[in-house]
Image (cartoon, coloured by chain):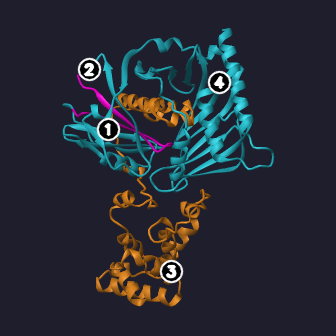
Amino acid sequence: MMNFWVVGLVLSVLSMASVAQSQPSSGTAVDPIVLLQRVADSAISLNYSGVFVYRNGDIEETSRITRARLNGRDVERIEVIEGSAREIIRSGTEVKCFLPAQNRLVVEQRSTASGLPVLSPAVLDDLQQHYVVRTGGLGRVAGNICQRLILEPRDALRYAHHLWVEPTTGLLLKTGTVNQQGRVLESFTFTQVTFGSQVSRQQLVPSAELQSGNVHRIHSSEVRASDLKWGIENLPPGFRIQKMMVRRLTPPPSSHDVVHIVISDGLAAVSVFIEPEGDSKSNKVDQQSGAMSMYSRQIGEFRALVMGEVPLVTARLIADSIERRR
Amino acid sequence: MKQHVSALVDGEQSVGDLECVCSALKRPDILSDFADYTRIGAALRGESRLSFDVSAKVMAALQREPTVFAPQPLSAITGEHTCSTGRFFLREFSALAAASAGVVLVAWVVLSQTPAEPEKQLASTVIATPAVVPAAEAQNTLPQDRFQEYVLAHQTHSSNTALMGGSRNVRAVSSTQNGR
């Protein structure tokens, strides 16, 4: 217990010190890039707990999130507090997702802990080639004065992102994904939040239900491009392959693995899942739900599914760039 | 200019000159020519049912449209003028069209002038026309459990989770797909 508080305190102090260092003096314009960097840093270092509203089109749901570092591991718990009691716990390299309506517990295990890369200067530089990053006005979210940060895309291949950042911690308290018509496709808004030492360890304890259900265990391990028979050429401008993985379901309902390729432009993320079509051929997927687009493409006896927070046209372009190597 | 207007009505105007013709249509005499050519074209094609004047109804419909307070358009930020291919062009053109008589065909004329394959244009152009995909046309046949599994994997391995915070993981269990 003592370790938890000490770690929390140290992280909070370090976070505050870093903020104080980069905080512009009174009357000076806030550098949007510095602020963006602070957001990225706080996402992996800050202890916080709060309630947020997720809105996707007409759907609106309230959830509670708690994040802290425990015994050298990042632990994060999200419970949906409306409707069925869905819950997600991320602890180090493992993510558990409990879906009570289906009595299903999905456990995803990563082979590496490097799932959360920080925005490097190179990534920030790339980002600015495809987004105009600027600050907006001040706004109040969950009782905190926030600085608005706007990332406007330079083309039609990505969405705009409006971020409300609590300036002392760098925590995002509100985000909106906006399409070119100015319509907010998806938003996350904190209605209550506490930082640092006020976060209780008890809030990270999984519910009893999370220990039950039909367990679907998935192990994903990173592979090299040369290990795969798949290539992605001519990606849309600004998008690059971040990692390639093979996903394995245990116990296997079938004998095939799923190739998972993660692509990003530094902000928008897209996943490509490639698997054998199997006996039960499914129809083509061509869907947009809020900010999430999904598009599938048949490649021989395989099906590639592209999924990500990009316009559908971008998902299609990425799907078209997938090639089966000889 | 009359030749360009005539070409526009006949659907033979090149896309590159559309902006120029669009600007010229602000002049009353050119607009009058445009309306005349549209009527002549309709008469030649025997489209008598399109000869009535619908401008009053169109203008009334435009009046009823809500004012949208949307974020600054992309063109204003980038300095790129998208009149020839973008939404601005269509909006301005539609307003002009509504002001002229018997021009219900105009929207179709304009649409026929726009590139037929926006995806290819996007691939080769940095600033491009947005492709709007109506949700009603969307289809999703992915099984629910597979969908949730994929969204969870997507969120777990996405770099934007690092920037945007872990709350994005809630997408994996959102009632949008959970069917509660």
Instruction: Please state which of the two labelled residues, at mark 4 or mark 1, is closer to the viewer.
Output: 4
Tell me the kind of residue under disc 1.
Answer: Thr
Answer with mark 4 or mark 2, whichever residue precedes in sequence. 4
The residue that label 4 is drawn on is: A47
Answer with mark 1 or mark 3, whichever residue precedes in sequence. 3
Tell me the kind of residue under disc 2.
Answer: Pro
Is residue B101 shown above or below A160? below
**Foreground: B17 or A35?**
A35
Label 4 resides on the chain identified as: A
Image quadrant in which you'd find residue B115: bottom left
Q: Is residue A131 magenta?
A: no
Label 1 resides on the chain identified as: B
Label 2 resides on the chain identified as: A
Question: What shade does chain B have?
Answer: orange
C-alpha span from label 1 to label 3: 46 Å
Say which residue appears at 46% left-offset and 76% top-offset: B19
Secondary structure, mark 2, is loop
Instruction: Please state which of the two labelled residues, at mark 4 or mark 2, is closer to the viewer.
Output: 4
Badge 4 vs badge 1, beta-carbon distance below 8 Å: no
Question: What shade does chain A have?
Answer: cyan
Estimate how packed mark 3 is, as few (under 14), some (14 to 19) or many (20 or more) residues with alpha carbons within 10 Å.
some
The residue that label 1 is drawn on is: B141
Instruction: Please state which of the two labelled residues, at mark 4 or mark 3, is closer to the viewer.
Output: 4
Say which residue appears at 62% left-offset and 45% top-offset: A33
User: Magenta part of the protein: which range?
Assistant: A252-277
Q: Is residue A266 magenta?
A: yes
Q: Position of residue A314 (x, y in %)?
A: 40, 49
C-alpha span from label 4 to label 3: 57 Å
Q: Position of residue B37 (x, y in %)?
A: 38, 87
